[in-house]
Amino acid sequence: MRFHFTITIVLFLYPVTLFSQIGITSGLSRKQPSTAFYPLTYISLEDQEVSGYGFVNPVDYKTIVFISEKPTDSLVKDWKSIKVKSATVYRENFKDFVDKMEDLGLKLDSTDQKKIRSKTNSLSDTLQVYFLRKMKGAIAHGLRQFIYENEEIRLFRFVPSLSFMPPPVIMFQTTELPVYESETYFISYLSHKAFKRSVKKSLKKCPKMIENAENGKYFPESKEGLLEFAEDYKTYCSN
């Protein structure tokens, strides 16, 4: 019972993430727990919209694990690994999760709830990911979480995970082309020095933002700082 409870919490917090107990070490096991499969829609490489159930593959974050029908058994073995342009995973909100735990006889007290909430920045009902390619710099291609967009720039980050520490990196694109066709740049939040160096490299044609970064603006990473970065990009870097 304890083991099941732990896994269920992990799968709720990050349904796109699975621990090594269920096959993450060298590839996913052919049998995956049905609780990992959430409603989702994806856009295929042929630009078709498809609905079903699944999650982002936590082994390489390059594909989604997918089945077309809602699982009825406790384990799912007939899933497919599919390359997509984008996907939206519809997750439970925190209240639904607590209700599910109580239905299983695993009531969460206020301390447990606080601990769970502290392990994620926010418990969102949806997770929107896009496949980023044409990377500028030593950053791998793959499905990344969309976080913000204005008229000139899109921002992304690595998909949150409990099985490894996501790199402190924010990726961005201009909005001239669709996501899948756009060149992707990055800024590093590993340290203030790394941040300023990456801004200087990725924003060569935008001296005002380089100056702002040198003067301490946009760092450390925060929701407000990223919004300011995006809005300043629109102000100072648009053609």
Image (spheres, helix red, strand yellow):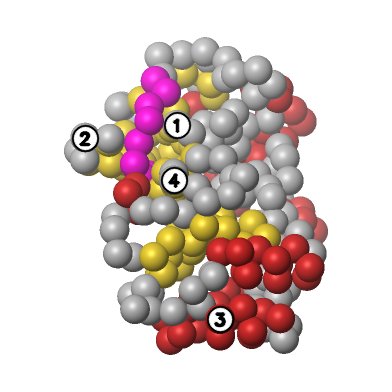
Q: Position of residue 194 (x, y in %)?
A: 75, 63
- Give the camera-side residue of 75 and 159: 159
- Identify the disc placed on residue 171: none
Q: Amino acid at mark 2?
A: Glu
Q: Quadrant of the N terminus?
A: top right
Asked where in the image residue 133 lies, by quadrant, the reply is top left
Name the residue beneath numbered marker 1. Answer: 63
Residue count near mark 3 (Cα–Cα under 10 Å), binned few <14, some 14–19, many ≥20:
some
Q: Earlier in the sequence, mark 3 or mark 2?
A: 2
In the displayed structure image, the side of residue 201 where residue 117 appears, left or right: right
Q: Is 184 situated left or right of 228 in this image?
A: left
Residue under label 2, please give it: 46
How far across and down, in percent of the image, does residue 203 sit? 54, 70
Q: Magenta stretch?
A: 80-87
Q: CA distance from mark 4 to mark 3?
A: 23 Å
Residue type, label 4: Lys
First-in-chain label (1 vs 2): 2
Which label's residue is closer to the chain start, 3 or 1?
1
Q: Tell me how far mark 3 sits from mark 2, CA to CA.
A: 39 Å
Which SS class for mark 3?
Answer: helix
What amino acid is at disc 3? Pro
Numbered circle sitting on residue 207: 3
**50 w.r.t. 235: above or below:** above
C-alpha separation, residue under disc 4 versus residue under disc 1: 17 Å
Q: Residue at x 59, y 28 (%)?
A: 59
Q: Name the secondary structure under disc 4.
A: loop
Query: Circle 1: is it few (<14), some (14-19), or many (20+) Cα within 10 Å?
Result: many
Earlier residue among tags 4 and 1: 1
Residue 159 vertical position relative to residue 80 in the rendered view, above or below: below
Overall secondary structure of the magenta section: strand
Which numbered mark, 4 or 1, is in the foreground of this view?
A: 4
